[in-house]
């Protein structure tokens, strides 16, 4: 899902919470006592007087340049371009990095699954029914022009995002009723009964805009006018579609708060935009940018042998990624008649030879995905537990019997690239679905040819598609790749104007309302949502509500496993692959913590690394 920095609660990291080292909120917190932090299930690691997060270097020096290409995106952002500095609406392509320019009520700790601590708000009190949150603002909070940041700005921001924000924001704010500011120091946020469990954290992590600034501007318009911010950075130099720089605010009001101490160390953070991944790689070898996370195994295995690697000017590291990978795969648009029958979809799953693709194209760097909750304890395994069965039994007869047995796992091929046994199985399933071969072409029950268009927005994955398409040919299926530019691609995907396309589902450490954009019937009918497959299953809808209403982490885990079983039984995708590692390369002028925080999205380089002047001088001498 949305992937912002640790300051925001938009991507919460994945994994189970260990009891060791964490403290429960006292019962008084639910009776209105002000607390310095909050979490979904009431557990906090850090006390009220903590000085900094454990995973950062609180004495990191400030200075220097950090430059990279986008590796995560949220809402209307693109990996390849930008045309707007409004990154929170549907229109335009928002500039990556705009999240660095705004503060939020609270900031999350990346070594806890979902805890947040005071940023613009110094504390929060929660009503006994958990439907009213009262945030007390820090009186020193300021926008970057020196004007005061008040509760009025917070209320304006939250209400505006609910009304005019990106559709994904609107969906996740469904249970947010309103925000009010009785005075400059107090924000009262009201939620609907039976609210989603994680929506208060989501609200606390949203950006705060200046009410005065937008008094003369339309919030919902795409624009290259730089908005007034309050965060650690402000927009500097930029060229639309090419690059954007963010300059550190030297007198940032929040720089010495515990949630920020040791972070946001670079004087300049710069994002470069490339339309082509190969060109982007060459840009890195030429030092056009300084940090790169490598997502293509072939490139990592074969192309990191340029001179700067050999002489040590560029370092390569493999860092652990302890967050679940979510699920990546080819998603069928089940809104189309040709993909209505799950037997057709399953036949196509059998036609993809992952083992050959991984060995031949990806240098055995990946493991096979099976679940949208991949690499977490929310993946369904074996027979359903009693807790899962209790959730699933009401839907017996409405969902496939498989849901009550072993969860579906993609077949393992012989690695030949064209496993005849699996293709025979695919043929059998297509025939059973009434898709028979006539005149050499596989035909749908209505007599029309079964053809498939794979929609793609960049060429790197063409070889992976080609190996898949090769196996569709002996099945009598004509398939092709449609490669289009990123702007067209985003427009078509948001309008569900595609047949098959690749998507990655990203789950949080504590999934709640964030499940809706991926899995629910409402999202399937909402343009711009992440439910590309068109999943519209009443059982999944009900199980999502069970997950959202879970009172304990264990209950949440069981509910997500139940969702996983029904989703996998629906054959909505051809699962691809995942890795539990970050592959990073960088020009050797940085220092960084030993390893990323457990629940961090990415390695946190732009936030938690720092410029090493001695290394930079040595690097300059080595030219």
Image (cartoon, rainbow, N blue to C red):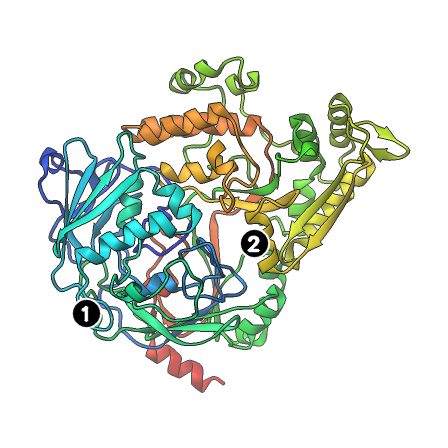
Q: Are marks 2 and 1 in contact (CB under 8 Å)?
A: no
The answer to whether residue 330 is left or right of residue 581 is right
Tell me if I can see residue 270 in this picture.
yes
Where in the figure is residue 466, as x and y percent of width and height?
73, 49
**Residue ranking furthest to the front:** 216
**Residue ranking furthest to the right:** 439
- Secondary structure beneath dot 2 equals helix
Reading the image, the residue beneath label 2 is: 490
Q: Which residue is drawn at 53% across and 16% down?
A: 398
Q: Residue at x 21, y 35 (%)?
A: 131
Q: For the residue carrying disc 1, how many other residues have a C-alpha within 10 Å: few (<14), some (14-19), or many (20+)?
A: few
Numbered circle sitting on residue 319: none
Where in the figure is residue 324, as x and y percent of width and height?
43, 43
Residue 257 figure quarter: bottom left
Where in the figure is residue 200, as x and y percent of width and height?
26, 42
Q: Which residue is drawn at 60% across and 46% down?
A: 502
Where in the figure is residue 362, as x and y percent of width and height?
63, 51
Q: Residue at x 68, y 32 (%)?
A: 337
Compare residues 295 and 550 and report the one nearer the observer.
550
Q: Is residue 181 above or below residue 39?
A: below
Tell me if I can see residue 520 in this picture.
no
Compare residues 140 and 35 and report the one nearer the observer.
140
Numbered circle sitting on residue 147: 1
Q: Distance between the residues labelled 2 and 1?
A: 37 Å
Which is more N-terminal, label 1 or label 2?
1
- Secondary structure beneath dot 1 equals loop
The answer to whether residue 265 is left or right of residue 583 is left
Residue 433 figure quarter: top right
The answer to whether residue 369 is left or right of residue 32 is right
Compare residues 95 and 416 and report the one nearer the observer.
95
The answer to whether residue 620 is left or right of residue 283 is left
């Amino acid at each position: 899902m949305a992937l912002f920095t640790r300051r925001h609660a938009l991507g919460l990291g994945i994994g189970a919470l260990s009891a060791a080292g964490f403290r429960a909120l006292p019962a008084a917190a639910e009776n209105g006592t002000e607390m310095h932090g909050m979490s979904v299930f009431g557990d906090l690691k850090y006390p009220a007087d903590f000085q900094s997060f454990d995973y950062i270097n609180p004495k990191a020096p400030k200075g220097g340049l950090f430059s990279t290409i986008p590796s995560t995106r949220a809402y209307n952002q693109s990996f390849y371009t930008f045309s707007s500095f409004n990154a929170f609406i549907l229109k335009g392509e928002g500039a990556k990095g705009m999240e660095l320019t705004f503060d939020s009520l609270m900031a999350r700790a990346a070594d806890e699954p979902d805890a947040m601590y005071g940023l613009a708000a110094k504390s929060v009190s929660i009503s006994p029914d958990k439907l009213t949150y009262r945030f007390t603002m820090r009186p020193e909070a300021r926008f970057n022009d020196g004007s005061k940041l008040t509760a009025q700005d917070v209320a304006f921001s939250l209400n505006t995002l609910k009304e005019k924000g990106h559709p994904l924001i609107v969906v996740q704010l469904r249970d947010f009723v309103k925000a009010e500011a009785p005075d400059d120091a107090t924000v009262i946020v009201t939620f609907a009964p039976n609210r989603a469990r994680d929506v208060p954290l989501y609200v606390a992590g949203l950006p705060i805009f200046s009410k005065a600034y937008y008094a003369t501007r339309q919030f919902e318009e795409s624009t290259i006018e730089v908005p007034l911010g309050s965060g650690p950075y402000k927009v500097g130099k930029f060229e639309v579609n090419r690059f954007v720089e963010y300059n550190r605010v030297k007198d940032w009001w929040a720089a010495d708060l515990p949630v920020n101490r040791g972070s946001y160390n670079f004087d300049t953070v710069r994002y470069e935009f490339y339309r082509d991944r190969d060109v982007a790689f060459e840009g890195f070898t030429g030092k056009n940018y300084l940090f790169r996370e490598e997502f293509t195994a072939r490139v990592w295995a074969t192309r990191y042998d340029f001179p700067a690697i050999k002489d040590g000017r560029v370092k390569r590291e493999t860092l652990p990624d302890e967050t679940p990978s979510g699920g990546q795969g080819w998603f069928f648009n089940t809104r189309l008649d040709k993909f209505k029958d799950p037997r057709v979809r399953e036949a196509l799953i059998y036609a993809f030879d992952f083992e050959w693709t991984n060995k031949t194209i990806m240098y055995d760097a990946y493991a096979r995905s099976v679940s949208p909750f991949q690499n977490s304890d929310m993946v369904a395994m074996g027979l359903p537990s009693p807790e899962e069965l209790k959730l699933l039994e009401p839907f017996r007869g409405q969902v496939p019997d498989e849901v009550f047995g072993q969860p579906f796992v993609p077949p393992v091929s012989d690695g030949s690239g064209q496993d005849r046994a699996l293709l025979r199985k695919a043929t059998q399933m297509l025939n059973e679905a009434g898709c028979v071969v006539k005149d050499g072409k596989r035909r749908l029950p209505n007599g029309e040819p079964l053809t498939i268009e794979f929609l793609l927005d960049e060429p790197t994955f063409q070889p992976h598609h080609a190996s898949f398409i090769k196996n569709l040919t002996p099945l009598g299926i004509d398939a092709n790749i449609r490669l289009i530019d990123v702007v067209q691609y985003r427009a078509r995907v948001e309008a569900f104007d595609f047949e098959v396309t690749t998507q990655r589902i990203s789950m949080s450490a504590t999934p709640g309302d964030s499940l809706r954009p991926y899995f629910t019937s409402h999202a399937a009918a909402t343009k711009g949502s992440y439910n590309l497959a068109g999943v519209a299953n009443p059982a999944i809808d009900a199980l999502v509500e069970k997950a959202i209403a879970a009172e304990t982490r264990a209950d949440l885990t069981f509910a997500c496993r139940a969702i996983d079983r029904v989703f996998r039984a629906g054959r909505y995708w051809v699962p691809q692959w995942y890795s539990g590692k970050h592959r990073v390369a960088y020009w050797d002028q940085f220092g960084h913590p030993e390893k990323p925080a457990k629940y961090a999205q990415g390695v946190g380089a732009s936030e938690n690394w720092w410029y090493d002047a001695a290394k930079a001088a040595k690097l300059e001498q080595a030219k």
